[in-house]
Amino acid sequence: MNITTLGSTGLKVGRIGLGCTTFGREIDEATSFAIMDYALANGITLFDTAEAYGGGEAKEYRKNYLGVVDNREVTDEAHSSEKIVGRWLASRKRRDQITLCTKVTTNHSREHVSQALDASLERLQTDFVDIYMYHSFDSDTPVDERVSAMDQAVRSGKARHAACSNYDAEQLREALQTAARLGMRPFEVIEPNYNLLVRDIESETLPLCQENGIGVMSYSPLGAGFLTGKYTPDRNAFPERTRFHVIPGHADIYFSEKNFAIVDKLHDFAERVGVPALRLAIGWVLKNPAVDTVLVGARSTAHLDNAIAAEAMEIPAAWHAELSA
C-alpha cells in the first residue's frame, strides 16, 4: 500500500481508506470487525465514519422522507457505525495505528458541534478524532459560526484537524477566507464524491485544494455501487441490502439514461482489456494525483481486495484517456 500525506495536515495515510458507512446498516458487527482487521493488516489505516451512519438513521430516513416503515438493515441501532468502530477500537487496542475521521450532520453552531463531538467520542471510545468534519454544507448556520465551531473543536484537543464534506468550491473558498479573516484554523481536509459519473470537483474544487494544501479524501469511487452494473432502471428492483435499497435517495444522483449508458460502456471496455470493471473504476480515481486518498466501502473483505488490486494496478495512458472520455 502506497503511503501519502493528507494535504498539509502531516497525516500519513494509505492511498486507500476504509469507508465505514456499511457497519450495522448493510453488514453486521462480526463482518465489520473482520473488515477492519483485514484493512489494518493490509495497510489501510484511515477509517471514515459519521454520526449519521447507522441502521437506525437509515430506517428513520425512509420513514421521514419516503413514508416507508420497514426493516432493511441488519440492525436498527442508532449511530451503529461509530459504535461498532468504537467497540473494535476498544477490543483491538489499535487506536494509535488508526487515522480516525467522523462527521457532524446538521446544526453547525458552536454549542451543537461541541455536543455532537463529545457524543461521537463516547461512541468511538476515544479521547480525540484525527479529522472532524461537517457532513454537508449547512446554509442555516452563518459562516463565521461554522468556522468558529470547528476552530473550537480543534483547540479543545478533541479533534486534530477541521474538515468538510460535500462542499463545493465556492463554499470551501468562503470558509477559508473567513478563517483567515478571523485568525482561526482553516478546513484542512475535504471529502467529496468523485467517480466516473460525478466529476464536478475537477474544474474548481481540486485546484482550490491544491492551492491551499487541503487534503482530498474522495468517496464513492464506484458510485455507491452503481458502476458495478448490478442495478437496472427499475427503482423497485434494488437488490436487498445494497446501498440504494437501504437509502433509496442515493439513486437520484445516478439514475439517468446517460449514466446507464456509461456503465454499459465501462463494462464493455473492461471485457475488452480483460480487467474487472470495478477495478478500472477505482483505479481511474486513484490515477488523479489531486486525490490523496480514496475511501472504499465494503460488505466483505473481497471488496477491499478489489481496491487493493486497483491501487497496485498500472493504468496505461490510452486506457485512462478512454475511461475519462
Image: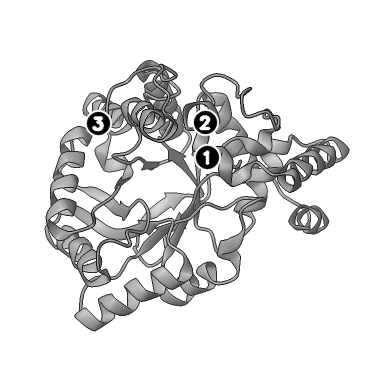
Precedes in sequence: disc 1 or disc 2? 2
**Marks 1 and 2: which is nearer the front?**
1
Q: Above or below — where is 99 with respect to 249? A: below
Kindly check if marks 1 and 2 are in contact, taking CB atoms under 8 A apart as contact: yes
Q: Which residue, given by chain and number where applicable, does mark 1 sit on? A: 250
The residues tagged by marks 1 and 2 sit, at their Cα atoms, a distance apart of 8 Å
Amino acid type at mark 3: Gly
Find numbered disc 3 in the image and state the secondary structure of the residue it sits on.
helix
- First in sequence, mark 3 or 1: give its number: 3
In the rendered image, residue 53, in percent from the top left (x then y), is placed at 35, 35
Is label 2 in a helix, a strand or a loop? helix
Which residue is nearer to you in this view: 108 or 162? Answer: 108
Front residue (pair 231, 26): 231
Measured from the top left, where is residue 237 in percent x and y?
63, 22
What amino acid type is highlighted by mark number 2? Arg
Task: Return the mark for residue 86.
Answer: 3
Q: Is residue 177 above or below residue 87?
A: below
Q: Position of residue 244 (x, y in %)?
A: 54, 31
For label 2, the residue is: 243
